Image: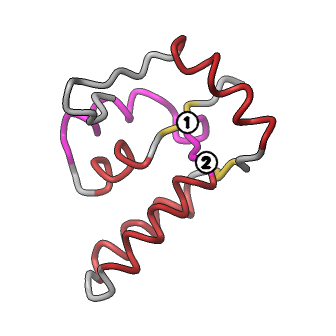
Amino acid sequence: MIRYTRDTNTVSHLIRGNATVGRRVVRVPMARLCISAITKGELRFGLAKRAGATRLHAAVAEFLRRVDVLPWNSDTADRYGPARPLSNFRDDRSGRSTC
């Protein structure tokens, strides 16, 4: 099965309700979406900085219940570099995700 790994910026935009990102993400069945352990850690870090944001905490928790978290190890990093330019993920000049 083909998996679609989303990065921290894309997930953050999705959770915060960005309509453009939402339209792109819903094209893929939820069972095919995944994130890396790094993205999960970055989401948790963001929540730690916003302890009082209860709705955000709930939204992140719900997202994490529904998505697979893939391990990030040395082998993964070795495969990521060559595969990254082949992905359909693009960055605009500001460095923000356009997916």
Residue at 73%, 50% (x, y): give it: 71
The residue positioned farthest toward the bottom in the image shown = 52
Q: Which corner quadrant holds the C terminus?
A: top left
Residue at 33%, 79% (x, y): give it: 49
The residue positioned farthest toward the top in the image shown = 86
The residue positioned farthest toward the right in the image shown = 75
Residue at 54%, 64% (x, y): give it: 41
Confirm or deny contact between disc 2 and disc 1 (CB under 8 A).
Answer: yes
Q: Magenta residues?
A: 18-36
| As drawn, 55 above or below 93 | below
SS of the residue under disc 2: strand
SS of the residue under disc 1: strand
Residue with the mark numbered 2: 36
How far across and down, in percent of the image, does residue 58 sit?
A: 38, 75
How far across and down, in percent of the image, does residue 73 sit?
A: 76, 46
Residue with the mark numbered 1: 5
> What is the quadrant of residue 57 in the picture?
bottom left
| As drawn, 46 above or below 22 | below
Q: 10 Å neighbourhood of mark 1: few (<14), some, or many (≥20)?
A: some
Residue at 55%, 56% (x, y): give it: 66
Disc 1 residue type (three-letter): Thr
